[in-house]
Image (spheres, rainbow, N blue to C red):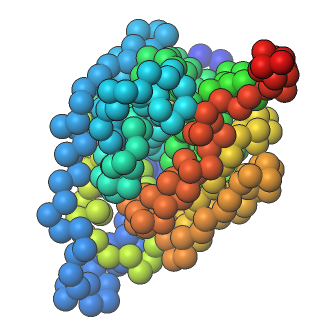
Amino acid sequence: MARSQGMRGEPSAQGAWRSGLQQVTSLGAQTATGAMRRRRGGKSSTRIDPHAGVDFKSIYRDDVATVVADDGVALAVRTVMTGSPDPAANASWGRTATPELTVIFVHGFTLRMAAWHFQRYALAQKWADRRIQMVFYDQRGHGASDPASAESSTMAQLGDDLAAVIRTMAPTGPVVLVGHSMGGMSIMSLARRHSGLFAHSGRIAGVALVSTAARGLTEAGLGEGLRNPVMDALRVSVRLIPRAVEAGRGITRRALQPVLIAASFGPDYYSPACGRAVEAMIQNTPIATMVNFLAVLESHDETTAIPVIAQVPTVVMAGDEDLLTPLPNSLSIYAQLGTDSRLVIGEGCGHMLPLEAPELVTEGIDDLVSRSRLALGRPMMPWRRRRKANAHE
């Protein structure tokens, strides 16, 4: 049978779309079987869900803000200020400032700020006696933020978006960055494009990288199954015939969703509530966002950002059962960081470490904040010490 051809002998967009959707069905069937078996296997029906009744949307009831990115895309933001204001404090930097520092959380691919649900509430309790601002935002094309065009769906743009969030939500004072999966890659992009923020006189005081990778997602692990003509066809389709792709969203999701869900949790983890929360986040992510950023995850390379991040205290966290960004990715990053870096491994955990092992991640972030470079105030430079000493002579 003759195949419909487009320009320069390439398959037409319509032909690529049809071929892609046929192959998508096969890919989805292969991965869905494993996910279904895990969900129904063992004695799960008699187990108690430790997170039953948790409202994973409650984070959207926090203080509302909007950050407008450089290209006009509106990013949905929620903020939490811990502790109580000190009316006697008048310093502009350090522990007596308001806030003493800001912690910005960056979520992963097809997720939203709700992925940090447990950290939002646990850290608010831990820092009840400290004035710390927590900032959560939905990346472009995700959650309540504006859609992202194909042209703006790049790792460079995600790094610039984070820079905009810092400028708007934390115009002064030290900042600690916490990124999960693609959120960690966004931090790396920020470091590559705005390296001055991480320098000795910069404002980035610490970085937490959770279940992430410095290079393309498809180089190892379950993500390798996503590097195929199916995704190429979908990427072409979402640009040229978006309505056709949207019409086939059910087939598309049957391919991508099981792959992402299968990588979310370790084989022995049990919490239907968390599972439903992750599924809902993925289901509510626009198909164009999924396809466009998938191309980014396949090809990105932020390895040159690691030496920049190494200038500040860091923590690298990962699950040893992570199929999407396998443990070797985190070990490689950790090996390239500075002496003030720590490695935290969640035994038996998958990709969604903030939800699967919330205490582990919370403790890792709290420890990072306690040893962050500027949390105790801007370091005094040698010439400032000499000037102060001369003033007392």
Residue furthest to the front in view is 393
Residue furthest to the left in view is 53
Front position in the image: 135 or 102:
102
The correct choice, above or below, for 252 with respect to 367 in the image is above
Front position in the image: 13 or 1:
13
Q: Position of residue 318 (x, y in %)?
A: 58, 62
Front position in the image: 40 or 120:
120
Q: Is residue 359 visible?
A: yes
Q: Position of residue 358 (x, y in %)?
A: 40, 63
The reply, left or right, for residue 387 in relation to residue 239 is right
Q: Position of residue 392 (x, y in %)?
A: 78, 19
Q: How many marks?
A: 0
Q: Which image quadrant is residue 244 in?
A: top left
Front position in the image: 380 or 393:
393
Q: Position of residue 29 (x, y in %)?
A: 39, 63
The reply, left or right, for residue 213 in relation to residue 1 is right
- Residue at x 62% of width, y 44% of height: 372
Q: Which image quadrant is residue 203 in?
A: top right
- Residue at x 37% of width, y 27% of height: 88
- Residue at x 63% of width, y 55% of height: 316
Q: Which image quadrant is residue 168 in?
A: top left
Tell me the quadrant of the picture where the C terminus can be found.
top right
The reply, left or right, for residue 1 in relation to residue 338 is left
The correct choice, above or below, for 112 with respect to 360 in the image is above
Q: Is residue 241 visible?
A: no
- Residue at x 41% of width, y 80% of height: 268
